Amino acid sequence: MIKAGFIGFGRMGITHFSMLNTHPKVKIMAVCDQSSTMLKVLNKYVDVKCYKNYKKMLDEIKLDCVLISTPGDSHAEIIMSCIRKGIHVFVEKPFTMTSSEGREIVDEIAEKPIVNQVGYVNRFNEVFMEVKRLIDDGIIGKVVNFSGEMHGATVLKDSKSSWRGKKSAGGGCLFEFASHCIDLVIYLFDKPDTAAGSIMQSIYSSEVEDLVSASFLYKNGCSGSIFVNWSDETYRKPTNIIKILGTHGKIIADKHAFKIYLKEKDTRHGFDQGWNTRYITDFGKPARFYLRGNEFTNQLDCFIDCIDKGEQSNIASFAEALKTDIIMDAITQDAARNLPREGRLTGNADTQDKASFWKRITKRKD
Amino acid sequence: MLDRIIFGDNQFFGINHMSEDKAQELAEKFKDLRAITDVLDIAYDCGIKAFMLNTHERTKEICDHFRNNPSRYADLALYPSMPYAHKYANAVAEKGIFGTLRDYILADSSAGDVLRMIAKGGMSLFEQDMLKVMQLLVDMEMKIFRGLNVKVVFLQNIVTDLLLGLKVKEAFVGFSSYIQERYKVEAGFNTMNMPMLVDFLHECGIENPIVCSSINKAGYFMNPNKESYEIALQGKNFRAMAMSILASGAIKPEEAVEYVCKQKAIQSIVFGASSKQHIIQTKDLIERFS
């Protein structure tokens, strides 16, 4: 049995626990969380050892792997502790807070190899996987331009009490939301060479951005853009849409379905000339255990499979996630350069509170 | 005895598992209560008297409408499903799980009193007795249906499957017995993992449980696979209810209903539709193939 430990037991930690606890090759040994209420409840109903201090947990229990679902600012330190002990790591996104932290970790892994994965779950969504396969097959020719959008209603007021509302803790729309959108772009088209025209705008939050947009340029002549807003109440749940224009056609995809337009019929993939729609039910497979969508289960199963088979790298490895961290750094710096003269870009909430946020953003430039 | 045909409510709340555009269209179509009750009336008048209702924010309006027209809905049977998890999702992101639960409970007058009374000596109710917390939450959600004829109370699939993964037997036993003792009706469970759940409920000592899951010819939302569902339906002791029989439109209605009706262990079929034509067509097909 693969012995697993959990660090961070909020919404994502619990979800991962539930999905992994049903895996036939995994035995969950211990959980670490800051909340003593959570640990007491857990102790009462679930058969695991509970810790408040992760170092103590790593010292006392012999673990094969750890799942980290803590706020982003703690990722680098915890990951390093695990690497030194030879423990395989799955960490929730974003990978780290800056690309320099991420680079150090990737270098460390080159010395002390472990299975490593970041929770970029779109890479396990069957629609996006199918779209990648089609693009790589060249079905729409050379990709000329794309636009990636992500919308949600996660933040509809200023939430200073939550870590999600604090940049220093790894909160904000860029780390928490746009990272998924950027990762999807990198998964499909690899890392952009330049980020330009970046905007980080707050709508409700006083300390973090609620909206991120940026343009991406590639040396091969492709261009693209992202638009991400987590403060849009018209969305019932977080939604990803990607539109891809190629020399031979176009693809529009979300998590459930994609539409493909082809200039010419493609018998190899079974598409007619013009528009074709495919739903996830046409090619998706059920999951071993379903909780939040097949992709959530499949990403954990991929991690466990890699441990089981001794395969160090996988589709959502730290090295891949580092590319997203690099682009997030680039967007942050570019957005700071693009600020209007008065130094802030805010939505409808009280602008006075927002000064600190923009000061911080500007500071990150250095 | 479960109703053979139960009308579901996902279409009213902008839920469509297949298409986000379609979901938005539905949300717009049903923004007025009248649009919802018109569709419910079509179902009711063609003989479908049983409705499965999630505890969505808008369900209270629907239930007020039922309560205000008792003679119109004299034969009504409700199958509530709780909690409607999206209602809590944003609060959980902001305040954490316990913060959200505490705020929701404190906002309710009677449940809030219980919480304040029990939270003594620095120990929160969560630490002392999560089952009591669950009971308070059930009571809060059940207020939506007060005075109406409730037949089975379901635990919604996100919560059912989360607890199944956590393997917390106490929660399943506690929910079942509380629904029976307090509301004098049976508990049921919605799930996306039917074969695993049925086995687990048996391990919990819950005999012949009521389990509602997606069952369709396409194998859509049937985890880990369609075959395991068919085997469970043939060999396991439980009362099966089928939902998502049309797999969000992936299967033609006739084919879809024929498949579900061939599974003789399925006692009850839940379907949602938003036009008169689809409601009548699906009902007629179920009756024809049953």
Image (cartoon, coloured by chain):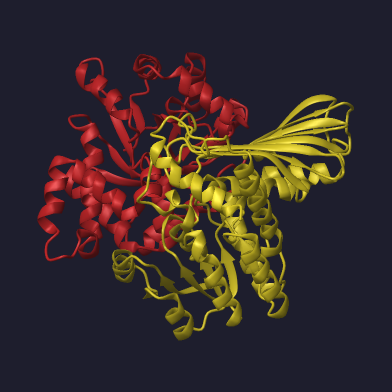
Q: Which chain is yellow?
A: A
Q: Residue at x 31, y 37 (%)?
A: B80
- Quadrant where the N terminus of chain A sits is bottom right
User: Residue B129: x, y in percent?
Assistant: 21, 61
Q: Is residue A284 visible?
A: no
With A9 as the anchor, is A90 left or right in this view? Answer: right
* Residue at 56 percent of width and 35 percent of height: A341
Which residue is more in the foreground, B141 or A88?
A: A88
Q: Percent position (x, y) of residue B162?
A: 42, 55
The x, y position of residue A258, in whole percent, is 70, 34
Q: Quadrant of the C terminus of chain A?
A: bottom right
Nearest the viewer among B77 and A180 is A180
For chain B, the rendered hue is red
Q: Is residue A359 visible?
A: yes
Number of numbered tags placed on the structure image: 0
Specify the farthest residue to the front.
A341
